[in-house]
Amino acid sequence: MSAQSNVLRAVPSPAGVPDLSELAARLSTGFALLGLPDRLRVIRDTIPGRIAFTTSFGIEDQAITHAIFDTALAVDVVTLDTGRLFPETYDVWAQTEQRYRRRIRGFSPSQERVEGFVAREGINAFRASVEARHACCHIRKVEPLRRALTGAAGWIAGLRGDQSGNRAAMRYAVVDAAHGVIKVNPLIDWTRERVVDYVRANDIPYNALHDRGFLSIGCAPCTRAVAPGEPERAGRWWWEQEDKKECGLHLDAAPDLAPQRTERALADHDA
C-alpha cells in the first residue's frame, strides 16, 4: 500500500465532521512521507469544499502552481495584486498562464482605501514606521486575502520553515481561525535548494529577479536583492528589525499581527 493511501486512511472523512485542529494535526503528521504532488492530492482529497492557493510568483509558489496545474487538481490558484509589484512579477504571471493555459485570478486592494491612505500618509509612508507599513500591508494584502479566501475551506501557502526565524516553528497544517480555514504549508520542510532543483527539473517558469539576487520577492518598494551571506528575507523591509518582517498574511508566523491589532493600528492612521 502506498504512503499516500496510508495517509488518506488515517484522516477522517468529511462525513465524520472532524475537529479542525485534529484534522490539521493529522495532516501535518502524514505529509512527511509524501512528495509534493501527493501532498497536494491529500489536501484536496481531505478538505471538503473550495481550496485556494495564494501565489506571489516566487520560486516556491511556482513549484506548487506547477504541481496543481500539471495534475489538473481542483484548487483555485489566486494572487494578491497589490498594485506595487515588480514588472518581472507580472511577466512571470503571464508566462505561467501561457505555459499551463490556465488563468490565475488576481485580487486587488480597495482603490478608495489605497487613495485615502496615500493622501493622509504619503506615497511611501510604509518607511516612516512599522505601524504605517503594517497598515499599508493590511490594505494591499490582508483585505484582498480575505476576499480571496471567502467561501474557502482550505488555504495552501508556499512558506518554508528555513526562510526565517519566525517561520521555523510553523507546521504543515494549522487552523487559521481568522479566515475559518485549514491552512497548509506543503513546502514547510523543503530547503531552497530542493525547490530550485524541482523547478529546474520540471522547466517551470520563474521570476527573473531570482537570478539577480532577489531571494524573497514582494512589492517593489519594499524588496531589494540579498547580499551573499545575508538571510533569505533580509531584502524584505530591510529598514526594519529582522524579527518584524511579516506582513500579516501568515499569522502562524506572526501572531502579533492578528487582524484585531492590525485594524487598531490602521484605525489610528485613519484618525
Image: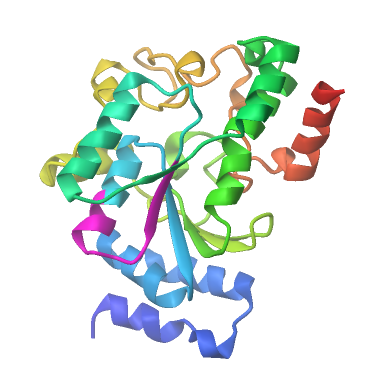
Magenta-tinted stretch: 66-79
Q: Relative to 118, is 98 above or below?
A: below
Q: Position of residue 242 (x, y in %)?
A: 59, 22
Image point (71%, 21%), residue name: 116
Identify the residue at the far right of this view.
Answer: 271
- Above/below status of 62 relative to 219: below
* Magenta stretch contains residue 78: yes
Q: Nearer the viewer, residue 114 or 198?
A: 114
Q: Residue at x 52, y 36 (%)?
A: 108
Residue 259 figure quarter: top right
Residue 143 among those drawn in magenta: no
Q: Identify the coloring.
A: rainbow
Which residue: 29% across, 65% down? 73
Extreme residue in the front direction: 112
Where residue 50 sits: x, y (%)? 47, 67
Q: Which of these two is toward me, 63 or 1?
A: 63
Looking at the image, which is closer to me, 121 or 42? Answer: 121
Q: What is the x, y in percent for residue 226?
A: 39, 16
Residue at the spot 68% in from the left edge and 59% down from the top edge: 177
Q: Quadrant of the C terminus?
A: top right
